Structure formats: C-alpha cells, structure tokens
Image (cartoon, rainbow, N blue to C red):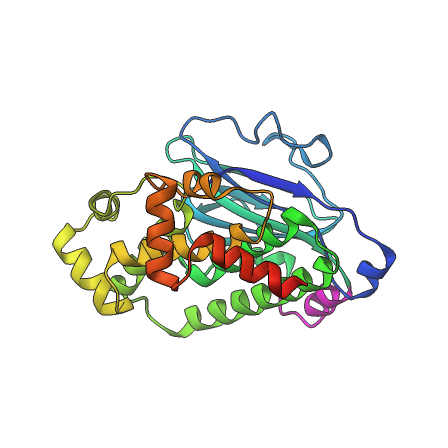
Amino acid sequence: MINYYKYLPTSSEDESWGLHVLNTGCNRINKNETYPSIQHPAHHYFNWNKGRILDEYQVIYIAKGEGLFESAGCKQHMVKEGTVLLLFPGEWHRFKPSQETGWDEYWVGYKGAIMENLVQQQFFSAQKAILHIGINEVIIDLLETIIEKTKTEKTGYQPLVSGIIVHLLGEIHSLTKQGEFEPEDITESIINKARVIFRTNIDHEMAIEKTAEELNVSYAWFRKAFKMYTGIAPHQYLLQLKIEKAKMLLTDYSTSIKEIAFNLNFNSAYYFSKLFKEKTGVSPVQFRNNMHGKRK
C-alpha cells in the first residue's frame, strides 16, 4: 500500500447529481507511528484528546490491524480489521490505531441528497457507526477504484465516482445484513484475508510463504485451500492482480512502461512486458496503442 490522499473541488453541477466526492485516500500506519501523520491536511486534522467534527459523511474501512473508535452516538469501542467506520456531518468523533498493531485504512468523504435519504430511511445511523463486515475484497476493490478515478480528475469523474460510492454503500449494507444471519466460515475468512493482503501489497515484493505465516496457517494448507476457494493458485492470483493493475496504469500516458514495471515490483521492464503479453495476448505498448486508438 502506498499512502495517498486527495481533496477534490466540486462544481454546482457535481453537487446537483445527488452525491459528490470530497476526498479519498489510503494509509498504512505502522506500529508506534504518530496518528494522524503530521502531513495530514490542517482542515481535517485532529487528535485523540479533542476529536473533531466534520461537515461531510465518510466511510472508513480498516483492512488490517486494530484500534479504538468513539463518537457522540457510539461509546468507545475496540475496532478490529474488517470494520467499517461511518462518520456523519456535525457528529463529534475520534479514532486511532493501536500502537501495538497499527492499521491499514481506506476512506472516502462525500455529501449529497442520496446519502441524506439513506440516513432518513434508517439504512445508516450515527448510533450504528461501527459495522463489522469482515475482510472483503470487493470493498477494497471499490475503494481502490474510487482512488484511481480521482487521481486524474478526468471530465465527468464526479458522477462516475458517486455511482461507485452508492455501490460501496450497498455492499456494506448487504454484508452487514448477511452477518446478522450467517455464521462465519473460518476457512473462507482466511482466504478473503489473503486476497486483501495480496491486493494491498501489490506494489511490494511478496512471498506466498510469508502470507501463510501471517495468517497462522501452513504453506501447504494455504495453497490447497486458496486454490479450492478461488480456482487458481495464490501466485497466479497475485500475478493476475498485477496485470489488471498494469492495465489501469497503462491508461495514464505520462507513465512509462519501465515506471509501471518498477511500481508493480517486477524484476525488469523486459520481464513485465513478456509476462503481460503471455497473459493478455498483446504487449504493454500494443495495449496502450489500442487504448489510444479507442480514444480517437
């Protein structure tokens, strides 16, 4: 995970759509690290002692680690990985990762009549601001897509991202309801956590054995269980994630093939290009040229 945040301007047209995104990002907070970082923007900065009040909604997803959350509507509560924290405008709150574990967090801030209606209809409430939905790859994928779409701020991105936020809220609501009735499958939970580990470490060198160790299972069991649940071996799954990420990066014409290979931690641009062609049938250059042709 590469730490990232962005605060976005909005127009009256964006705001009239019904939902508009204000900010988004992701952070990896390591053990014993200051939180929030001193680089955190002043208009959203807070500390544990004082907390803060925002004039927006936020969805925060804790993908790894644990910590504490408290708000005006929720008493102080331990937060574990796989938890969604909901922030409401005008609602005092505070949260922080544990010094012993740190945490990985994703977030998106937004406003609009669509969310106001969901709150009015009691799909979401400030009294139920802590929702444990478990480790879920779809949630990570939606949040990462929001982040990618806001990086370039291409024309029309606001309505597109607002649709993804509605999808995200629907997934959260559905997973919350399912959790009320379905017992957790331990093996499935481990595989889901593995998939999130792969996704959030796609830009780092990753040993499958280390993943199994982090999950407290044997490498042999992990390989067998992962393939049984996903239909693909963990190493191939990780490669597929890298190829899909590469496709997204190739749409940015200012980033070179060499930079993409480096960002995805391939040994060389040559190896990356060779593997990309094996998996997609075209080289990265051809893929980019095809994309360029579609844009004309």
Image location of residue 4, percent across then percent down? 57, 39
Image location of residue 210, percent across then percent down? 23, 42
The C terminus sits in image quarter: bottom right
Residue at image coords 45%, 53%: 284
Image location of residue 150, percent across then percent down? 65, 50
Residue at image coords 57%, 54%: 251
Q: Does 136 appear in magenta?
A: no
Residue furthest to the right in view is 12
Q: Magenta stretch: give its range.
A: 113-124
Q: Quadrant of residue 43?
A: top right
Closer to the camera, 21 or 98? 21
Is residue 48 in sight in this rendering? yes
Q: Does 117 appear in magenta?
A: yes
Depicted 173 relative to depicted 102: above or below: below
Q: Quadrant of residue 86?
A: bottom right
Depicted 95 relative to depicted 30: above or below: below
Residue at image coords 21%, 68%: 228
Closer to the camera, 173 or 196? 196
Image location of residue 231, percent across then percent down? 26, 69
Residue at image coords 29%, 64%: 188
Closer to the camera, 234 or 277? 277
The N terminus sits in image quarter: top left
Answer left or right for 75 relative to 13. left
Depicted 46 relative to depicted 159: above or below: above
Instruction: Assign the magenta stretch its main secondary structure.
Output: helix
Answer left or right for 210 relative to 266. left
Is residue 131 in sight in this rendering? no
